[in-house]
Amino acid sequence: MAVAIALAVIADILFAASGVLQQNTASQLDYSLNLKLKLISKLFADRKWFIGFLFSIIGYIISFVALDFGSLVLVESLMILNFLIALPISNIVKKIKFNLKELVYSLLTVLGLILFLVVSDSKDSIGSYTPSRLLLSVAIFGLITVLGLYILKLTKSINLRTFWLAATGSLMNTLLALEIKQIISSLDLRGHMNLLATVFEAPGTYLLVPTFLVALLLIQSAFQSEKLSWSLPTINLINPVATTAIAVILFNSTISSSFLAVILETIGIISVTWGILMLSTDNAKSENTSMNNLT
């Protein structure tokens, strides 16, 4: 478990740096490109965004290796730390002064996360891909895509649109983690001599590419729509909650379910959610104040 935690935290640092670089670039492009493939081609031509993209790829690889040492719920829940690391990096880049309240909200988030992870004591029983699980993954992919695009079509508010873009992109990241976990379950990452060949023999491998591309487009569109303090918190909150729900309900993972455990897990989730929301709201106010002072 210690190895999984260490790897997940390293991945978080890379994701945080990636998020700041990518959001700063995406937010400067014409909004008419939002949710269009041309947005991705424009972003790939930018050196700063591409460095952020490389950071995220390395982060994905490290987090996938972490899944071989720890449960899906543990690794994905630790992704919440991504926002706590990205925010101070973003503030330094934008020259926003340190706010003591941000430290309090960050501490509240971390304590809630620790409480949830310790009490839940999550265990995986996901296993390798089967035809039925492959079909289930395809069905989840299709449902998220269709439902997400339909809601986005009806949404006019920029804030709500940002939320749905980030939420749908986060759900795609959840599915990506589930796909990887099932592939890893059929491999021995620490001793397999023909690892690459075995990976490409797994049927779920070929679902990774469309899942990753759709997640990339949705998340970059969310970055383009609003500030980092709006988009990244949504991604970081929905991902672990969705991962826990899907893993437990559909893929036989387990978390502690005694009466006391459920109460403490709920307190942990509320603490994390409240801390992230207050942190993002306070940071958005600080950013607006900083911009007003500049003008």
Image (cartoon, rainbow, N blue to C red):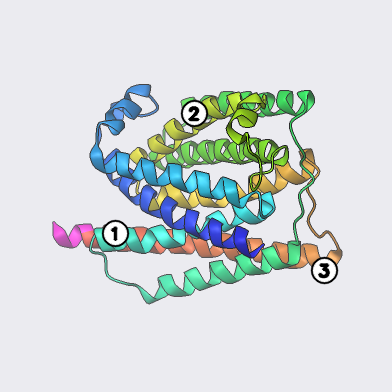
Task: Judge left or right: residue 257 versus residue 152.
Answer: right
- Which of the two discs, 3 and 1, labels the residue nearer the N terminus? 3
The residue tagged 1 is: 287
Identified at 39% across, 47% down, the residue is 55
* Residue 195 shown in magenta: no
Where does residue 96 sit, x and y in percent of width and height?
Answer: 26, 65
* The furthest residue to the front: 193
Q: Position of residue 171 (x, y in %)?
A: 58, 38
Q: Is residue 129 visible?
A: yes
Mark 2 burial class by Cα count in 10 Å: few <14, some 14-19, many 20+: some
Q: Which residue bears the numbered disc 3? A: 260
Label ID, residue 248: none
Q: Badge 1: how crowded within 10 Å, few (<14), some, or many (20+)?
A: some
Which residue is at the front of the view, 14 or 69?
Answer: 69
Query: Are the residues flagged by discs 2 and 3 in contact, CB closer than 8 Å?
Result: no
Task: Choose top left, top right, bottom left or bottom right for residue 249.
Answer: top right
Residue in the image at 51% along x and 37% along y = 169
Q: Amino acid at mark 2?
A: Val
Image quadrant containing the N terminus: bottom right
Q: Is residue 84 left or right of residue 202?
A: left
Give how far across and how far down residue 294 sits, in percent. 15, 59
Give the magenta-colored segment's residue range. 291-295
Chain-order first, disc 2 or disc 3? 2
Q: Which class describes the residues within 10 Å of circle 3: few (<14), some (14-19), or many (20+)?
A: few
**Cα separation between marks 2 and 3:** 39 Å
The location of residue 120, given as percent across then percent down, is: 75, 61
Residue type, label 1: Glu
Query: Mark on residue 214?
Result: 2
Q: Secondary structure at mark 3?
A: helix
Could you give the CA–CA distance between mark 3 and mark 1, rounded to whole angstroms? Answer: 40 Å
Whole-number angstrom distance, CA of label 2 to CA of label 1? 30 Å
